[in-house]
Amino acid sequence: MVPILALNVLASLALLASAGQIPTVDGVIGGVPTSTSSQGASRIIEDVVQVSGAPVAGKMRFITNSGVCETTPGVFQASGYADLTTTQSMWWWFFAARNNAATAPLAIWLNGGPGSSSMIGLFQENGPCRINTDEQTLSLNPFSWNNNANIQHLHRLYIDQPIGVGYSHGDLEVSGAKQAAVAVWKMLQIFLSDSTFSHLAENNFALWTESYGGHYGPAFAHYFLEQNEAIANGSISGITLNLRTLGIGNGLTDPLNQYPQYMEYALNNPYRQTVSTSTIERANNSFYASGGCQSLIEGCYETGSTSTCSRAQSVCNNNILSPLSGSFDVYDVREPSDDPYPPDIVPLLQSTSFMNSIGAESTFTESSNGVYSNFASTGDWMLNSAPDLAAVVDAGVRTVIYDGDADYICNFMGVEAMVNNLQTKFSATYASEQFTNYTVAGHPAGLVKNVGTFSYLRVFGAGHEVPAYNFTGLAVGQAAAQFFEQAMRGEPLIST
């Protein structure tokens, strides 16, 4: 299955392996193809094999209790498609709460990219199972985010979006986070209208995401709140999403404030200097030069021009983000660039027997070239999502911003600069607060600030996919499970 793209674009896109969520284009991490697909380009789907009937707009097609991944006896699961149109099918995988299913909140998970599958989060991070190092088998995850630890019970829904990502297939129409929000809201309306899942519509709702989720999270949450208001005043009909929690891990939200920190992180991160001092100086000069990265991002913020924003992405990633990574893993600077961890999920998810067992009907694509190219053509990468994030915080949604301190690509220094520049009702108090230690079962796990319904957490010893890592004395995913459970209970992040 290939997107309709110019041949030179196909040749130039080389996706990173393993934990990679961000493509390398012509040798540049997060680069812009020299010739991108037009907005709304189509995706060829001749290799789709319908396993559960033809798509019908607004309908669901799925199988239940496949026995894959969630092996806890008696716990319901389902996987399949919500057909947005007759030519757009969005893949999802649902895992019920292990206890108190009737009242448990519904939390959705979205990976980033743009163009990366949320099966990454399911199998490498916080799902009921994890991929083993043989890349062919799965093990039960004791720190799954649908667990019942600390009396927390919740339902999990992993969504491959936009169309063209993961197992989702059909016409590509999305080229930005705000468009993606509309499509996922429509998918959730279809999902919650189905008789199997309609009982969840009254429950509390949460959105968790990472990486490009720094754009997705604010855009989606803000759009969901706007749709709720429109439903309440009668201007549209639909199912209200009772949004209570937003979590964003290692997110790209505010490039203007985050990009200067690439130089700082390359020089002074907790683990190693990633490149020579002269390389850092060149990147710094490029950022502040006339017509350089800073001025291009400012122009993008001011105008929203697709050409300006796309050029900002190209220049900044060519001259700053990519060269400062050196020869190390951009998702974990402690490791070389060919780091095999987390194990690759593609061999298993492309297996015919695996696909048949879960009801998947199109070849799995971990990161979609077509979707990434559509986003790159509009420069959505360089838009500022901080105003949407601030609006969500001010609306009373409990918000957790977290990151792993070993991640380069969306590093904690940049995320902290973004948070420090947020304009919310808590900002003044947040600025006056000092970091406090965050412990898990008595073990140091990070540094935290809590103000009102807002929390920021820097996690020690974690890379880009925070739940995939551990720290001294803790199991893989243990720290992430604790802060997730606390946030879902509506609590600040407190040491244990």
Image (cartoon, helix red, strand yellow):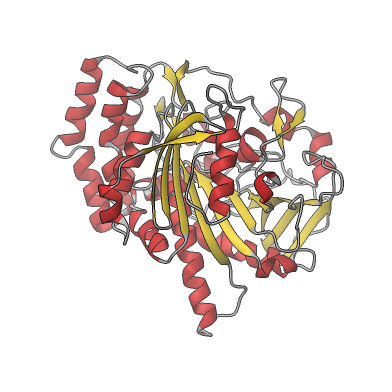
Query: On the rendered structure, is 391 left or right of 232?
Result: left
Q: Residue at x 29, y 37 (%)?
A: 259
The number of discs equals: 0
Q: Residue at x 31, y 27 (%)?
A: 265
Q: Between residue 265 and residue 367, name the one nearer to us.
A: 265
Q: How far across and down, in percent of the image, does residue 276 sit?
A: 27, 14
Is 393 drawn above or below residue 162 in the view shown? below
Is 395 drawn above or below residue 325 in the view shown? below
Query: On the rendered structure, is 432 left or right of 449?
Result: left
Q: How far across and down, in percent of the image, does residue 57 sit?
A: 70, 67
- Residue lying at the far left of the rendered structure: 290
* Residue 218 location, quadrant: bottom left
Q: Residue at x 60, y 34 (%)?
A: 478
Q: Between residue 308 and residue 241, name the one nearer to us.
A: 241
Task: Tell me the quarter of the image containing the N terminus.
Answer: top right
Is 250 drawn above or below residue 78 in the view shown? above
Q: How far across and down, in percent of the image, does residue 420 sit?
A: 28, 47
- Residue lying at the far bottom of the rendered structure: 234
Q: Residue at x 46, y 49 (%)?
A: 400
Instruction: Report if residue 77 is visible in the image.
Output: yes
Instruction: Report if residue 175 is visible in the image.
Output: no
Q: How far across and down, in percent of the image, does residue 462 sit?
A: 49, 29
Query: On the rendered structure, is 452 left or right of 261?
Result: right
* Residue 330 location, quadrant: top left
Q: Between residue 421 and residue 56, name the one nearer to us.
A: 421
Task: Tell me the quarter of the image containing the C terminus.
Answer: top right
